[in-house]
C-alpha cells in the first residue's frame, strides 16, 4: 500500500482518522498545533510529525485530511489543493457558500479532488437503505425524517444544527436526489443564549415530498434514527440498535379505497447487512480517490448542497419563517 496520506488535526475526531489511515497502510504523516499530541501519534503509528508547511512541500504526500475547526477548512484546503494535493475535509465543508465555492473552484482549477466527510454515506446500513430506494422496493417516497439526539456534547462555537444535522441532511439529499425548495426551522436556546440546543428543520421539495430533521444535545437519551416512508414499504435505520437490527423493513398494508384509509400492520423484517466500520470505509474511499481509482461520492458539490440547507436553516431560525434555497 502506498503511504501518501497526511492527517492534519489529531484531536477528538482526528485521532480516529489517524488510526484508520494507519490500519489501511496509507498514513505517512500527522500534524497538530499541540506539539505533544502530534508527537504522541507520530510515535504511536511510526509516521512523520510534520508542520502543515512541511506537508505542503512534501511531493510524496498526495492526499491531505483536514480534521480541524471549521473556520480553518477553506484556507487550509485551498492551500493544499494549490500545492496539487487531494483534500478530504471534515464536515461542514466550509463556513459559508462563498468559501465553499472557492474550494470547489480551486479543486477544478488544480485538477485535484475535494471530498467532504459525510460519514453516514459510507455506512453499510445507509447504503442498503439507498439501495432499497433506488430499486423501488419502498415505492414512491412519501416522507423522510431523521432524529439525532443525545445528552451532550454541548458546543459554544456552533449550534446543534451545524454540529449534528450535516450527516442527516446529506442522507436525505442522497435519497431524494435533489435540494429542497424551502427550509423552515424551529429551535430553542436553553443552555446558552443565541445557540440552539434543540431544533427541528423542515424541508419541502418541488416533487411534493417533505422531510424533517430533529436534533438536540439536550435530550435524556441517545437516538440516531432515519425513517423512510414509501408507498409500498417503510425502512428504519436505527444506529443505536445491535447490528443485526439496525435496518428494519415494514410492509404495512394501506388501503385507500374506502372513505377512511384502512391501515393493516405487518411484522417487522430485519435486513441482513454485511458489517464494516463506516469510518474505515470512508477512509478507504479517499485512498481510492487519491490513487485515481474513484471519484469522491461526497464531493465539494455535495458538500455545498448540504451547506445550502444548513445556511437556509440558520436564516429561517433568525427570520422565524421559511426560506427558499434559491434566495440564498
Image: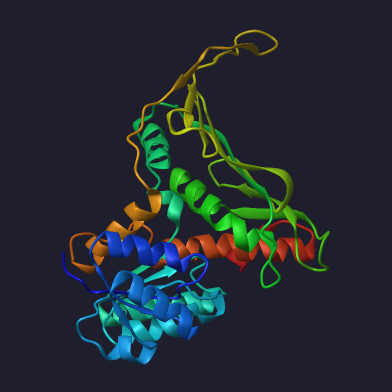
Work out which quarter of the rendered image holds the N terminus and state it.
bottom left
Note whether residue 179 is visible. no
Where residue 5 appears, as percent x and y from the top left, is 28, 73
Residue depicted at x 52% and y 73%? 94
On the rendered structure, is 246 left or right of 58? right
Q: Quadrant of the C terminus?
A: bottom right
Q: Is residue 61 left or right of residue 152?
A: left
Q: Residue furthest top?
A: 258
User: How many discs mark residues in the rendered view?
Assistant: 0
Q: Position of residue 201 (x, y in %)?
A: 67, 51
Q: 213 or 50: nearer the eye? A: 50
Rendered position, 48 above or below 17: below
What residue is drawn where x is 55% and y is 58%?
166
Residue at (49%, 32%) from the top-left corner? 242
The residue under the point 39% across, 49% down is: 278
Residue 111 in view of the camera: yes
Q: Is residue 152 above or below residue 300?
A: above
Query: For this rendering, which residue is in front, 207 or 29?
Result: 29
Q: Quadrant of residue 261?
A: top right
Colouring scheme, one of rainbow, by chain, secondary structure, one colour:
rainbow
From the top left corner, tell me how far across and down residue 140 is, in percent. 47, 30
User: x, y percentage for residue 220?
Assistant: 74, 43
| In this rendering, position of residue 49 left or right of residue 242 | left
Amino acid at each position: 500500500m502506498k503511504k501518501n496520506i497526511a492527517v492534519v488535526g489529531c484531536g477528538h475526531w482526528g485521532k480516529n482518522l489517524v488510526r484508520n489511515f494507519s490500519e489501511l497502510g496509507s498514513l505517512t504523516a500527522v500534524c497538530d498545533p499541540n506539539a505533544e499530541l502530534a508527537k504522541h501519534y507520530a510515535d504511536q503509528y511510526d509516521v512523520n510529525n510534520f508542520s502543515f508547511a512541511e506537508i505542503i512541500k512534501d511531493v510524496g504526500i498526495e492526499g491531505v485530511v483536514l480534521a480541524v475547526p471549521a473556520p480553518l477548512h477553506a484556507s487550509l484546503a485551498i492551500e493544499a489543493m494549490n500545492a496539487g494535493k487531494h483534500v478530504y475535509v471534515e464536515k461542514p465543508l466550509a463556513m459559508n457558500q462563498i468559501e465553499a465555492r472557492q474550494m470547489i473552484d480551486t479543486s477544478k482549477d488544480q485538477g485535484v479532488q475535494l471530498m467532504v466527510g459525510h460519514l453516514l454515506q459510507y455506512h453499510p446500513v445507509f447504503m442498503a437503505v439507498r439501495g432499497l430506494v433506488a430499486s423501488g422496493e419502498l415505492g414512491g417516497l412519501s416522507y423522510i425524517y431523521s432524529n439525532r439526539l443525545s445528552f451532550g456534547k454541548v458546543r459554544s462555537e456552533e449550534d446543534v444544527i451545524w454540529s449534528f444535522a450535516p450527516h442527516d441532511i446529506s442522507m436525505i439529499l442522497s435519497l431524494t436526489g435533489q435540494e429542497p425548495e424551502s427550509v423552515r426551522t424551529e429551535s430553542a436556546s436553553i443552555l446558552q443564549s443565541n445557540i440552539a440546543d434543540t431544533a427541528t428543520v423542515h424541508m419541502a421539495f418541488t416533487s411534493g415530498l417533505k422531510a424533517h430533521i430533529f436534533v438536540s444535545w439536550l435530550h435524556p437519551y441517545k437516538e440516531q434514527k432515519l425513517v423512510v416512508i414509501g408507498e409500498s414499504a417503510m425502512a428504519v435505520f436505527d444506529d443505536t440498535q445491535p447490528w443485526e437490527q439496525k435496518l428494519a423493513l415494514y410492509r404495512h398494508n394501506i388501503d385507500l379505497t374506502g372513505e377512511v384509509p384502512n391501515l393493516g400492520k405487518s411484522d417487522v423484517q430485519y435486513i441482513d447487512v454485511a458489517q464494516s466500520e463506516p469510518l474505515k470505509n470512508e477512509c478507504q474511499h479517499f485512498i481510492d480517490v487519491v490513487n485515481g481509482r474513484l471519484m469522491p461520492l461526497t464531493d465539494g458539490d455535495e458538500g455545498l448542497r448540504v451547506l445550502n440547507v444548513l445556511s437556509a436553516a440558520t436564516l429561517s431560525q433568525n427570520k422565524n419563517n421559511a426560506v427558499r434555497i434559491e434566495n440564498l
